[in-house]
Amino acid sequence: MTVRTRIAPSPTGDPHVGTAYVALFNLCFARQHGGQFILRIEDTDQTRSTPESEQDILRALRWLGLDWDEGPDVGGPHGPYRQSERKDSYRQYAMDLIEKGHAFYCFRTPEELDVIREERKAQGLNPGIKGDLELPAEEVQRRLEAGEPYVIRMKVPDEGTCVINDMLRGTIEIDWSQVDCQILLKSDGMPTYHLANVVDDHEMAITHVLRGEEWINSAPKHKLLYEYFGWDMPELCHLPLLRNPDKSKLSKRKNPTSINFYERMGFLPEAVINYLGRMGWSMPDEREKFSINEMIENFDIQRVSLGGPIFDVEKLRWLNGLWLREDISDDEFVERLRGWWFNEDALRALIPHVKGRADVFSDVAPMAAFMVSGMLELTPEQFAHNKLEEGQVKRVLQFALWRLEAQRHWSKENIFADIKELAKAMDLKMGEFMFPIFVAIAGTPNSWSVMDSMALLGPDMTRARLRHALNALGGFSKKETKKVEKEFAAL
Ligand code: GLU
């Protein structure tokens, strides 16, 4: 048997460090067994998936040095590797399950389902959606002929326990009463994650599924689907989730989670990969610095420890420093620095802004330093403004941050539109609203158009600086945050 593993990102946002972490472990496991590592795009959520996000994810994983043997960009014998292009086959599989009596048509509206959940709760039952929703065959036929919208759900047992084997956790038991009759095919004809994932893992001959522990609860549904189809199930291995230093689940609200941010900050891909390799895993000799090839040579999945690994940017920085000093020659240093941000394209992008403001070249570096910096040194005094109280300054930063976190298409025009709308909603003049933004982004209110700066700095660096500025002002307490969230929602 050839070991085949995969990473299956959904292209619905920034390339997440958690995706790179899981990809790395899948790659090491496959390579160590002389097997193959596949990349599959799970874009069945048509409203949230975008081609830009897909491109971004592929590019970021490549930047890190992760290489896949088969995927949407490199092809392979089991393609297409994008689920939206495999749409037709899923429907057929769902119909097969209906024929075999393992799935049923469901015509209930979300409102009806809510009522059913409440009723079940009142009876002391688990409020899950169960197979008793199935209608008599004639009724189904009548509704289908009438063209009523429907979904297809899988049947699951009402009681008993499902036993899952996990390579790291041994056996995991989950009560069937906890498991819903999962939708397999949505009313738009697209499969859900569960159906598409199982079908593709089978068709792509995946032998081992290494994925984040947030998927453990899906495992019973998947196991049942494999049984219904009569297929062998891949071995499962649920990796521990990455955590913030305060042990909470790694989230972009607290830490930059986009790989793009680390690239923009000037981290070395070798160091980022090295650090991800240390998330719950260690070398047999416990050494901290190692390359991806050394990791592959020494890989042993059983060395993964389940205590939540902490993703600490300071620690990563320290490791990056080691790499930079010990492994990058002077020539390479020059080369990498150029490639990073001291290159022709980056300089050209600055010309329209610096040319009109500089008299001599030596003026350029001070005025452009913020464009090539990480986090700026900020003090609360810098944010003092005669028209804005501190509470307003913090709100401007917080609201701008939340607003820009939701911005999917990063461009000067869209940033401008977001900001303008917020300023209006907060009843502030544009100049007043922009003051804290300038200080957060450029460290001074006297820079060139901050919209241009934000567009060039990119979403991740922009958000990180806004967050950093908020922190420099002491941020909001938990209680205040609740209040401010409400205000934001009401804008
Ligand atoms: N598309 C899922 C994700 O976004 C894949 C989960 C899995 O590996 O099964 O993480």
Image (cartoon, helix red, strand yellow):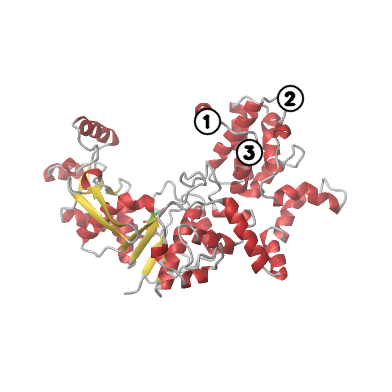
Label 2 vs 3, first from the N-terminus: 2
Q: Are marks 2 and 1 in contact (CB under 8 Å)?
A: no
Rendering quadrant holding ligand 1: bottom left
Question: Is 433 placed above or below 156 here?
Answer: above
Q: Earlier in the sequence, mark 3 or mark 1?
A: 3
Measured as percent of width and height from the top left, residue 24 is found at 47, 63
Question: What whole-number distance in Å separates the C-alpha atoms at marks 2 and 3?
Answer: 24 Å
Q: Is residue 79 visible?
A: no
The amino acid type of the residue labelled 2 equals Asn
Q: Secondary structure at mark 1?
A: helix
Label number found at residue 416 = 3
Q: Amino acid at mark 3?
A: Phe
Mark 1, residue position: 481
Task: Calculate the distance from the C-alpha at mark 3 to the C-alpha at mark 1.
Answer: 25 Å
- How far from the left and from the top, in percent, is residue 372? 70, 52
Between residue 349 and residue 138, name the one nearer to us.
Answer: 349
Q: Is residue 329 above or below residue 172?
A: below
The mark closer to the camera, 2 or 3, is: 2
N-terminal-most mark, 2 or 1: 2
Q: Is residue 135 above or below residue 161?
A: above
* Disc nearest the viewer among 3 and 1: 1
Q: Is disc 3 in contact with disc 1, using a CB cutoff of under 8 Å?
A: no
Q: Residue at x 63, y 62 (%)?
A: 322
Three-letter code for the amino acid on which mark 1 is drawn: Thr
Q: Is residue 2 left or right of residue 482?
A: left
Residue 25 x %, y %: 44, 63
| Residue in the image at 63% along x and 27% along y | 392
Task: Report the mark closest to the observer, 2 or 1.
Answer: 1
Q: Which residue is mark 2?
A: 386
